[in-house]
Image (cartoon, rainbow, N blue to C red):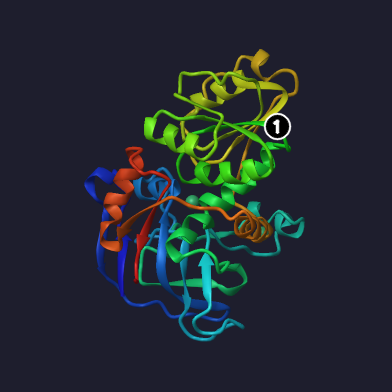
Amino acid sequence: MQACLLRAPAPVETNPLDFTDVPRPDPGPGQVLVRVHACGVCRTDLHVVEGELAPRRSPVIPGHQVVGVVERPAEGFAAGTRVGIAWLHRTDGTCEYCRAGQENLCDDAAFTGWTVDGGYAEYALADARFLYRIPEGFADLHAAPLLCAGIIGFRSLRLSGIRRGGRLGLYGFGGAAHVAIQVARHWGAEVYAVTRDERHRRLARELGAVWAGGSHDVPPAKLDSAIIFAPAGELVIAALKALKKGGTVALGGIHMSPIPPIDYALLYHERVVRSVANNTRQDGEDFLRVAAEIPIHTEVQVFPLEAANQALNALKNDAIRGAAVLQITP
Ligand SMILES: [Zn+2]
Ligand SMILES: [Zn+2]
């Protein structure tokens, strides 16, 4: 099969993904072989490719927002069933976190496109217990960004504590934020977007943000909650400055540049800073249901599989409106 292989992490400007032929994987017990139709391109892929996340499998096929169909009947899935593979590939099910319903924090989890091969390929393997059924209303290309940008954005919204009628700040306005804003507005929240790129500010306004400003602008109203999707630690300070007493800043990314020292007065009055790590399957199921209800519309910029390096470069340069998606089979 054709796939994009990362042999060693390197800056994306050097086009480190090798578009090549590799053997098609064989499903083992509990696994399902998926013929990939589309795979979303996430900032986490950029962190894997550039080595900010240390290699856990090498070479590796990146990609963890995989939409495709079950190739042959397995594990109760009929051939042709449309499914999604997300970042949380498998957990041990036995550690203290799994037993406490916090499988997103599992001590021994596998992650798609990092510790096991992902979806920048014509075929991918999934653990049957971690497969999602994709709601019918979404075309493959538009469904792909729901699987990480959408699900992690949704968990971030939950952990941010935003309530109906509350004011929410979104820092960074890429794939995750452009989905999260649609859920937040569905919940009746007022959204303020902070992002350095004018095209992203325009998209935020189109999607109903009441205000959109640059990284040095301060939202015109105090926020109940904020979510930081951009990997820039200094935004934690900016968000705390914009936050009401008792408010929460949720950090939606897996990697962030160092957070500058925080003046205690910024944190005092019970403000909370918390990270968001992975998601539970329940988050995924809940999100996909809400996404179909709303329904969420994802803006996608489509690249062929062989242009995965280009897609990652565009993502790094803020040049993607909404989410980038690789189209793998028509
Ligand atoms: Zn576990
Ligand atoms: Zn992701």
Front-most of 135 and 295? 295
Helix, strand or loop at mark 1? loop
Q: Does 242 sit left or right of 306 as displayed?
A: right
Question: According to the image, label 1 marks what residue?
Answer: 166
Quadrant containing ligand 1: bottom right
Image position, residue 186 (x, y; %): 65, 45
Asked whether 94 or 23 is in front, the reply is 23
Whether residue 72 sits left or right of residue 182 in the image: it is left
Q: Is mark 1 within 8 Å of ligand 2?
A: no
Using a 10 Å C-alpha cutoff, classify the residue at mark 1 as few (fewer than 14 neighbours), some (14 to 19) or many (20 or more): some
Image quadrant containing the C terminus: bottom left
Looking at the picture, how far across and down is residue 57, in whole percent? 41, 60
For the N terminus, the quadrant is bottom left
Q: Is residue 233 visible?
A: yes
Percent of width and height locating residue 106: 64, 55
Give the residue at x 49% y 24%.
Answer: 234
Q: Is residue 67 above or below residue 236?
A: below
Total numbered labels placed on residues in the image:
1
Q: Is residue 197 above or below residue 14?
A: above
Q: Residue at x 70, y 27 (%)?
A: 247
* Figure check: 20 above or below 76: above
Q: Amino acid at mark 1?
A: Gly
Coordinates of residue 25 in the picture (x, y in percent)? 40, 77
What residue is shown at x 55% (from left), y 37% (from top)?
A: 208
Inspect this view and state whether residue 60 appears: no
Give the residue at x 58% y 55%: 295
